[in-house]
Image (tube, helix red, strand yellow):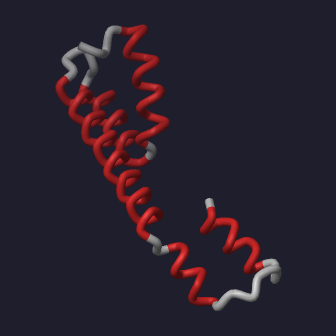
Amino acid sequence: MHSIFSIVLHVQGYSDHDPFEILKNIFSIPVIISFSVLVLSNLANRIMGIVAVAKNNTVSDGEKTLWIVGFVLLSFITSIVFLIMAKGKGFAE
């Protein structure tokens, strides 16, 4: 949050900071760690979703293709829709 506010204040002219301070804030250790955790959790979500769809025997091949494309393109939204539909139609094992 500090990095975002410092960038906004710098762009609006409220700050006398050196322009390289913005880069120092953006590429700070907490921001890099948070971004890494976000990327890894997103990748894990995509992989688990694709594996769950691929192992599922109740879904036809055409549906599997659409689900996999959905997980590749929009994993978070597809995960929510898949969980809702899995509960109603018995997709989950």
Using the image, determine if residue 90 lies above or below residue 14.
above
Q: Nearer the viewer, residue 23 or 80?
A: 23
- Quarter of the figure with the C terminus: top left
**Image-based side of 51 in relation to 21, left or right:** left
Residue at 46% over, 18% down = 84
Q: Quadrant of residue 71?
A: top left
**Which quadrant would the N terminus be assigned to in this image?**
bottom right
Give x and y (percent) for residue 34.
43, 56
Residue 91 shown left or right of residue 76 in the figure: left
Where is 5 relative to 38, above or below?
Answer: below
Rendered view: 54 above or below 2 = above
Q: Which residue is drawn at 60% across and 68% down?
A: 3
Up the image or down, 40 lies above or below 19; here it is above
Residue at (19%, 17%) from the top-left corner?
Answer: 57
Q: Residue 13: percent from the left, percent from the top?
A: 81, 83
Image x and y of residue 63, in percent: 33, 28
Callout count: 0
Front-most of residues 1 and 72: 1
Q: Position of residue 78 (x, y in %)?
A: 44, 34
- When asked about the image quadrant of residue 90, the answer is top left
Residue at left offset 53%, top offset 81%: 23
